Image (cartoon, rainbow, N blue to C red):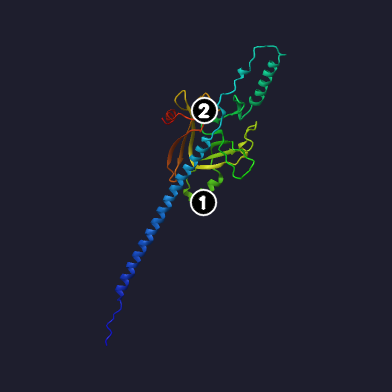
């Protein structure tokens, strides 16, 4: 019986190899493109995540901002006044002693400037437009029974990028490394928050919560003017803030500047919702 089976010709083999090569190249290219898209989307997501994480951190701390002025009035020295001028009168002596104690405790106190009616110290809130220092109850102990207060002093401010930041971007981008903006950092002090001396933040390690920030501005709700202004223009600015606006200009991962604004409110006081709507205008 004659065998009629024929093999592939050289031309058929070459055509098959060529087609297989083209299919393989298209698969590899598609996989490469998919990987690039995934990397791009992941980078964009991480870029957005760092922004929202920073804003959520600010919101958490500010929502817990603490001052007795949210639920009581400042202690009035006039309430100690008495009509008698007799220095031998016990009431007169008590009045002088109380005034002296208050002056000694609060006159040069860098953290608290006065007591309220219940003798709870009122914290000094400090800002210089690009930083904000305030007293808050936002701290949560990491370890059980740790000797840490739930109250803490928090500062948000801008600082220049560190040498490590510069080295990291130089290694990652080489000669194409972008010019770095400032870092938005957070300082937190939860040990002995009711101290009488000022806090040396140079001895505290900050937490970088956002990079490549071009500008940062804090402003505070001024009820008399019906708008956000500097804290010094608010009557209770030292120890009470009803709402805060944060404006941030930053560079995204493509080096393009973007602007973002957020308004934050504390838990105290309990707002009338109609009045609270005014903050958003």
Residue 181 seen from this side: no
Which of disc 1 and disc 2 is earlier in sequence? 1
Residue at 69% x, 20% y is 97
Report whether 65 appears left or right of 81. left
Please say if 37 is above or below 69: below
Q: Closer to the camera: disc 2 or disc 1?
A: 2
Report helix, strand or loop for mark 1. Answer: helix
Alpha-carbon distance for marks 2 and 1?
42 Å
Residue, disc 1: 171
10 Å crowding of disc 1: few (<14), some (14-19), many (20+): few
Residue 262 location (% of width, % of height): 45, 36
Please identify the quadrant where the C terminus is shown. top left
10 Å crowding of disc 2: few (<14), some (14-19), many (20+): many
How many discs mark residues in the rendered view? 2
Residue 172 location (% of width, % of height): 49, 51
Pick the residue in front: 191 or 211: 191
Report whether 244 appears left or right of 1. right
Residue 64 location (% of width, % of height): 53, 35
Residue at 36% x, 63% y is 25
Please say if 23 is above or below 123: below
Please say if 123 is above or below 170: above
Residue, disc 2: 231
Q: In which quarter of the image is residue 146?
A: top right
Pick the residue in front: 64 or 236: 64
Report helix, strand or loop for mark 2. Answer: helix
Pick the residue in front: 117 or 17: 117
Residue 15 seen from this side: yes
Pick the residue in front: 30 or 155: 155
Please identify the quadrant where the N terminus is shown. bottom left
């Amino acid at each position: 019986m004659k065998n009629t089976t024929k093999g592939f010709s050289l031309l058929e083999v070459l055509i098959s190899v060529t087609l297989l090569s083209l299919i393989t190249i298209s698969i590899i290219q598609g996989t490469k493109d998919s990987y690039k898209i995934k990397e791009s989307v992941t980078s964009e997501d991480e870029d957005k995540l760092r922004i929202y994480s920073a804003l959520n951190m600010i919101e958490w701390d500010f929502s817990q901002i603490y001052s007795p002025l949210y639920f009581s009035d400042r202690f009035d020295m006039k309430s100690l006044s008495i009509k008698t001028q007799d220095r031998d009168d016990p009431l007169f002596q008590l009045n002088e002693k109380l005034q002296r104690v208050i002056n000694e405790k609060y006159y040069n106190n860098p953290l608290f400037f006065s007591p309220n009616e219940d003798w709870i110290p009122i914290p000094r809130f400090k800002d210089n437009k690009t930083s904000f220092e305030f007293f808050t109850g936002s701290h949560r102990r990491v370890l059980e029974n740790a000797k840490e207060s739930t109250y803490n002093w928090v500062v948000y401010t801008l600082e220049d990028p560190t040498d490590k930041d510069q080295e990291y971007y130089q290694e990652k981008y080489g000669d194409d490394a972008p010019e770095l903006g400032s870092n938005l950092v957070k300082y937190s002090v939860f040990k002995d928050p009711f101290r009488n001396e000022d806090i040396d933040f140079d001895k505290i390690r900050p937490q970088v919560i956002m990079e490549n920030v071009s500008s940062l501005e804090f402003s505070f709700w001024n009820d008399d003017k019906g708008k956000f202004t500097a804290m010094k223009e608010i009557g209770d600015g030292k120890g009470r803030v009803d709402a805060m606006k944060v404006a941030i200009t930053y560079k995204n991962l493509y080096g393009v500047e973007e602007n973002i604004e957020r308004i934050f409110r504390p838990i105290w006081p309990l707002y009338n919702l109609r009045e609270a709507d005014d903050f958003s205008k």
